[in-house]
Image (cartoon, rainbow, N blue to C red):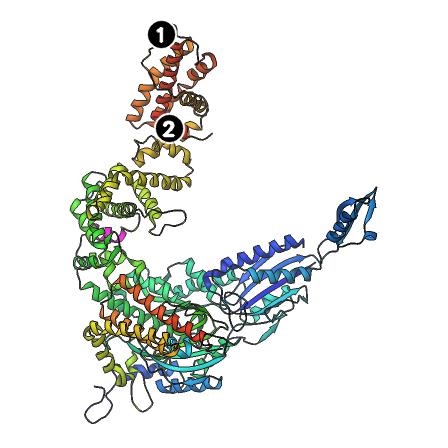
Amino acid sequence: MADFLLELLSEEIPARMQASARNDLARMFAERMTSAGLASGAIDVHSTPRRLVLISRDVSEQTEAAREEIKGPRSSAPPQALEGFFRKTGLKRDQLEDRDGVLFAIIDRPGRSAADVLAEAVQQIVANFPWPKSMRWGSGSQRWVRPLQGIVTILGDEIVPVEIDGLQSGATTVGHRFHHPGPITIGGASDYIEKLRACHVIVDQSEREKIVREGAVAAAQEAGLNLLPDEGLVVENAGLTEWPVPLLGRFDADYLDVPREVIVLTMRTNQKYFACTDEAGMLAPAFVCVANIDANDGGAAIVDGNRRVLAARLADARFFWEQDLKIPLEEQAQKLSGIVFHERLGTVADKVERVAKLARWLVEEGVVKGAKPDQVERAARLAKADLVTGMVGEFPELQGVIGGYFGRAQGEPNVVADAIRDHYGMPSEPTSVAVALADKLDTICAFFAIDQKPTGSKDPFALRRAAIASIEIIVRNGLRLSLTQAVRGGLANVAGQLKDSDAAHRLDRTAPEILDFFADRLKVQQREAGVRHDLIDAVFSLGSEDDLIRLLARVKALQEFVETKDGADLLTPYKRAANILKKEKWEATKVAAGSDLEAQEQALVAALHTAQPNASAAIEAEDFTSAMAALASLRKPIDDFFDHVTVNDPDKAKRERRLNLLTRFRDAVNKVADFSKIEG
Amino acid sequence: MPFDEEGVLAPAACISQSREIAHIHHGAPALSLSFQDLILTLHRYWGEQGCVILQPYDMEMGAGTFHPATVLRALGPDAWRAAYVQPCRRPTDGRYGENPNRLGHYYQYQVVLKPSPADLQDLYLGSLSAIGIDPLKHDIRFVEDDWESPTLGAWGLGWEVWCDGMEVTQFTYFQQVGGFECKPVTGELTYGLERLAMYIQGVDNVFALRFNDSGVSYGDVFLENEREMSAYNFEVANPETLFDAFRKAAAECENCLANKLPIPAYEQAIKASHVFNTLQARGVISVAERQAYIGRVRDLAKAACAEWLERGQGA
């Protein structure tokens, strides 16, 4: 047994692809070993910007030898049959074994050497590697994420020869691009990591991540600052360096006029820098960059260069900030009539008009409490104004945030500025809630109105996300609203703008479609909370329940109920009753109870007499647990009924009144939830 | 005007000399390369690598890539190595000479090597050393950046090369041009000359660059140009004339294609592309129309590329 080392050296692999590349490499290697039957121990994978590395421990010397027996025709079979078997096995008559008149081919498959299996595995892995994007280079046809430059394949201390598109594997690799550019010879898996470390390459990504993480914090602390932690940046910087060296630099404090988010964003996304704060938690005019070298001047030139790049970017940002600040948001908002929202849905100004109406309605109807209608409408009218600013043009991720800054700087009340800032998300402040919910509902209604619903994996307008966010906003803030009414309002706003008569006509058809869409999203959203989707269906299909808060309370009570013995036991007789009624296509008749009721009929009538009003009253009071308890009281009477009473009595009157009784029972249960939707 | 009455060069735009010198001291050896010496050094270096040193193409274009020495030569099986400076015009990037980092007209240094050699990265790093960048003092990095040109129907994978956090070069392995697979693959290096020079010289304002070592600054040469061209592109250009020019260039391109002349056809596609860029700056093309114009230029460029291959050029 020996350890196997594979290094695939290439030009720089994008940082964001390295984690999945490591996983893919480990998975593919394990798959090949299993399918070839070569036993091996633990697999370690590593990556740097220039290498993908796999070390497999304790690889067997060869695969197990195997013997295969193939049963053939009888030795007395006609010549054609015998010929056929010879061809199939590639053996001659005298190589076959005759066992009691039946021919057998015995094929020995000797064990394959590990080197053989590994060479083939490496070739297949490289040929089939699932890079998100791959390329060709030079005159070859090989594909890799970037040009492949070298392959190290060593089993124990022996090279496993592999050739890929003219590239011969060996024991030679290179060290750090600048600190140690020459070739280095690797002995094997045992010395690989340490040899590279001596050549300024830290092979293991988690070790580099630790250096970045701790080094950045230390660099900030040395300057009396705190680092704003950002694990994404840690991983990215570790993926961009083989020898990470965090360095602290400073920028001109004048730039701190620019909104903090803008500074942090441009540092993070454009430059991969960490941001720092001072003791008071305010953004400090400093950054931590991560170099890939131990610079011969201690990093002074690197820090100065990075400072200048950042200054140029911040100067740009400040230019836009100052330009935009001169123009009131109200004036910017007017320009939205020049931006197409969707070719069939008019401009962003049209959208803003709809959102403003719907947001105001949400407040005036008392759905969102604690907000002023005028402020909500104002926030809605200004919420999208930042889309035409230079700042959002440069930093599109900061839409909303930027508008919030401008609003505040231009004297809007805090609640309005906050609503502008937060309306893309899932806020909790009432003014923000009204604008955020109206914005999302409008988007859903508008696209459904022009029949642009999500289908399968296609959801180009992110309507599913909008629905999930709407549900979150409603649930988290305990908003009581009839979703039907809100959706119809949203659709009416769209229809009012669309100048085609169809839209208005389709309103009745579209509203239920949206409700179904919400039901589906609700199931997805509640799945994580462990809520059963069939129970949501059971409540949704009542048709009358479109208040999500009440609906979820109902579902919760229902779930608790069906998990009790009474609940589970009620389901069987319910389904039995429902099936009988369905089979009979039974419509309730006026036939009243006769004088000859069986005791079990009597008992069920009495139980329903109490349970029905109790359940109704409890539902009215939104006390769904009590409603379920009322249903539970029916469990024994209905069981007894089915055990002792024949529904299909030859006496027509008895049959009729019993079917009526079952109808009453089914309907009483259905008042709480449509039990026919419940699975199990 | 950049020259005063005596014909003496006017001082560089609003940048203090002391600051410039301070940076030179720790940024580079005694006296860093002037803008023109940077170009001459790159010419010498890439000439030694077997590149044909070409002069700029005599047409307006948005990037050095548009030069037929890149686009057309990237197609077909023939080996090809060339390097050249290409003036680039990006009307929407003009800032009337008021922004220290943005220009409506600037230079790219373009290198193409086909097939891309196995040591292309090392050759490139050699060029950085040649212009005075010490890779053990400065942090050189290859950061993922894939390139795509919708107007050329072209794309490739590669990086932006960072020097101390500043993007100094776009490094691309062409995969497709004009919608055709590149076989063999061309390696393309595009240096942003002004940025690189600003870095080497340690100046924060492009107009303060030393153009030569005889006292001429970049601003002396180009500041007035930026002012006037910004005014023209944003305010003065006659949209009707431009729309007409676009139509005529497109028609002429088709005329050339009908006569199986890919090079003049491609030139007309470049012309249409530049006219479109100016119309964009002029703000007379709506968002909806934009895609249609880009699509039109792409179709013309693709047809010219197809004709080039059809004629067996590059084969």
Q: Which residue is mark 2?
A: A674
Amino acid type, label 2: Asp
Instruction: Name the chain letter of the residue that bears numbered label 1.
Output: A
A319, B68: nearer the viewer: B68
* Image x and y of residue B208, in percent: 29, 82
With respect to residue A94, does A133 lie above or below?
A: below
Q: Badge 1, how many Cα within 10 Å: few under 14, some, many 20+?
A: few
Confirm whether the magenta stretch covers residue A421.
yes
Total marks drawn? 2
Dot 2: chain letter: A
Position of residue A677 measured from the top left corner of the image (x, y, whole percent): 41, 30
Discs 2 and 1 lie in a common subunit: yes
Whole-angstrom CA distance, mark 2 to mark 1, is 30 Å
In the rendered structure, which segment of residues is drawn in magenta? A408-422
Which disc, if any, is residue A594?
A: 1
Q: Secondary structure at mark 1?
A: loop
Q: Eyeballing the image, is A425 above or below A317?
A: above
Q: Position of residue A343 (x, y in %)?
A: 26, 55
Q: Is residue A250 visible?
A: no
